[in-house]
Amino acid sequence: MTDARMLVAEAIERPRDHVPANGTIETVEGWDSLGHMRIMLALEARLGRPMETEEILELASVEAIDRLLNGGSG
């Protein structure tokens, strides 16, 4: 989960401690619509591919991002 938390924290310019493992777009300060797009851009860079619209909508939690980064679906 560390990678997902760090990716989110860096994308929204917050300390990693402010992004809990169970954090979501609704609970993490700074994870607003602009923050979400920053997170998606960071994910695209990490994965080396563009994000699908469905993925962008589904990846609204640290857990979902972690699953994607570790080879599962968002």
Image (cartoon, helix red, strand yellow):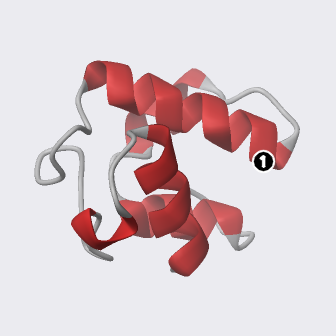
Nearer the observer, 57 or 44? 44
Crowdedness near tag 1: few (<14), some (14–19) or many (≥20) residues, C-alpha within 10 Å = few
The percent coordinates of residue 73 (x first, y second) are 62, 60
Query: Where the C terminus falls, by quadrant?
Result: bottom right
The percent coordinates of residue 31 (x first, y second) are 26, 39
Task: Say what secondary structure mark 1 lies in.
Answer: helix
Q: Residue furthest right?
A: 48
Tell me how many marks there are.
1
Nearer the observer, 38 or 57? 38
Residue in the picture at 52% in, 64% down = 6
**Horizontal side, residue 24 vs residue 26: left or right:** right
| Quadrant of the image occupied by residue 64 | bottom left
Residue with the mark numbered 1:
46
**Horizontal side, residue 1 vs residue 29: left or right:** right
| Quadrant of the image occupied by residue 58 | top left
**Horizontal side, residue 13 vs residue 23: left or right:** right
| Quadrant of the image occupied by residue 33 | top left
Q: Is residue 57 above or below residue 6?
A: above
The percent coordinates of residue 35 (x first, y second) are 36, 30
Residue in the picture at 24% in, 64% down = 18
Q: Is residue 11 above or below residue 63?
A: above
Residue in the picture at 39% in, 42% down = 13
Q: Amino acid type of disc 1?
A: Arg
The percent coordinates of residue 1 (x first, y second) are 51, 80
